[in-house]
Image (spheres, rainbow, N blue to C red):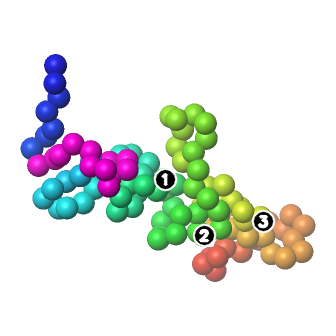
């Protein structure tokens, strides 16, 4: 049994890393958990143009069924590495975020 592509969709093109090429829009339609023009970047679900607020790396664990998560750098914390404890903090519950909120 041969699967036929849906109308308007071609088979996966070399430039769509984790997605399929849509001829009508000349763009890639990404698989879940991937973003970017070529569907070549993991999507950690963080809003904005910089994954993990620019303070970490979006990674997937060894379990291929797991969702990508941010692995924060240094002292950065939070789901999207958006929280930085104040300098000299000793467990102060008042954390500052990069956007000031």
Report the predominant secondary structure element of the magenta stretch. loop
Disc 3 is placed on an element classified as loop
Which part of the image, by quadrant, shows the N terminus? top left
Q: Residue at x 84, y 68 (%)?
A: 92
- The boundaries of the magenta stretch are 8-19
Extreme residue in the top direction: 1
Q: Tell me if label 3 and label 1 are in contact, CB under 8 Å.
A: no
Q: Does the magenta stretch include residue 82?
A: no
Dot 2 crowding, Cα within 10 Å, few <14, some 14–19, many 20+: some
Which part of the image, by quadrant, shows the C terminus? bottom right
Q: Does the magenta stretch include residue 9?
A: yes
Q: Quadrant of residue 55?
A: bottom right
> In whole angstroms, how far apart are the C-alphas of marks 2 and 3?
13 Å
Residue 97 position within the rendered picture, expressed as x and y whole percent measured from the top left: 66, 73
Residue 25 position within the rendered picture, expressed as x and y whole percent measured from the top left: 17, 61
Residue 64 higher or lower than 32, as above or below: above
Disc 3 or disc 1, which is closer to the eye? 1
Disc 1 is placed on an element classified as strand
Q: Which of marks 3 and 1 is nearer the N terminus?
A: 1
Q: In which quarter of the image is residue 40?
A: bottom left
Q: Residue 75 carries which label?
A: 3
> In whole angstroms, how far apart are the C-alphas of marks 3 and 1?
23 Å
Q: Name the residue under label 2.
A: 54
Residue 91 position within the rendered picture, expressed as x and y whole percent measured from the top left: 86, 64
Q: Mark 1 points at which residue?
A: 42
């Amino acid at each position: 049994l041969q699967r036929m592509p849906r109308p308007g969709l071609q088979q996966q093109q070399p430039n769509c890393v984790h997605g399929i090429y849509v001829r009508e829009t000349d763009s890639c339609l990404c698989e879940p958990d991937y973003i970017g023009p070529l569907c070549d970047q993991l999507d950690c679900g963080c809003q904005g143009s910089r994954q993990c607020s620019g303070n970490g790396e979006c990674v997937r664990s060894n379990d291929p069924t797991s969702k990508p998560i941010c692995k924060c750098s240094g002292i950065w914390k939070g789901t999207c590495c958006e929280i930085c404890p104040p300098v000299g903090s000793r467990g102060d519950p008042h954390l500052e975020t990069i956007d000031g909120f």
